[in-house]
Amino acid sequence: MGKSTFTVYKQSAVIPYREQGSRLLILLITSRNSGKWIVPKGLIEPGLSARESAALEALEEGGIGGEVSTKAVTQYSYNKWGGTCDVSVYLMKVNEELDEWQEMNERKREWVTVEKAAGRIKTRAIRETLEKLPRHINEADFVER
């Protein structure tokens, strides 16, 4: 019998938001391959914490920066690359939006209401977090990236 290997890939993501008057808006981006609406997410970079890596993904994929929650608001797993990806999801209070960014020619980005974001996102853990977003924001501590 051959030896079985099972790989776990550690990823992190942010749910980027801003307040516009009394409304909360979420920044969604498209995935490069399928064009589905997602939040910025990627492998945790060597030498970076999960939250630092999530902030870097937000900058590269969405051209945004801001304050990232000190603790993940949710976690989920999915199968990819012949293994399992474990994702830690943080909140990002966006205070900077670049006109030009690394992946601007590969992705679209759009600010939408929480309800619209929940309707577009396929990942259940993200949708459930969006449904309780005001509570998550009130309970979170943030640190500038």
Image (tube, rainbow, N blue to C red):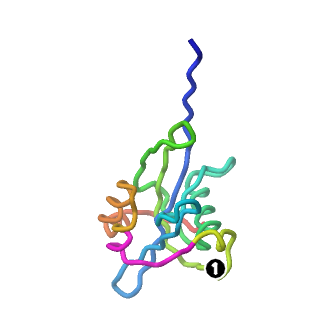
Whole-percent x and y of residue 70? 49, 58
> Element at badge 1?
loop
Magenta region? 108-117
The C terminus is located in which quarter?
bottom right
Q: Is residue 131 left or right of residue 137?
A: left
Residue situated in front as seen by the camera: 7 or 47: 7
- Residue 97 falls left or right of residue 88: right
Q: Nearer the viewer, residue 94 or 63?
A: 63
What residue do we see at 55% from left, 49% from top? Answer: 11
Disc 1: which residue: 98
Q: Badge 1 local density, few (<14 within 10 Å), some, or many (20+)?
A: few
> Which residue shows up at 68% across the image and 47% down it?
46
Amino acid on which disc 1 is placed = Leu
Q: Is residue 136 left or right of residue 144?
A: left
- From the top left corner, tell me how far across and down residue 72 is, in percent: 45, 54
Which quarter of the picture shows residue 113?
Answer: bottom left
Please say whether residue 109 is one of the residues in the magenta stretch. yes
Quadrant containing the N terminus is: top right
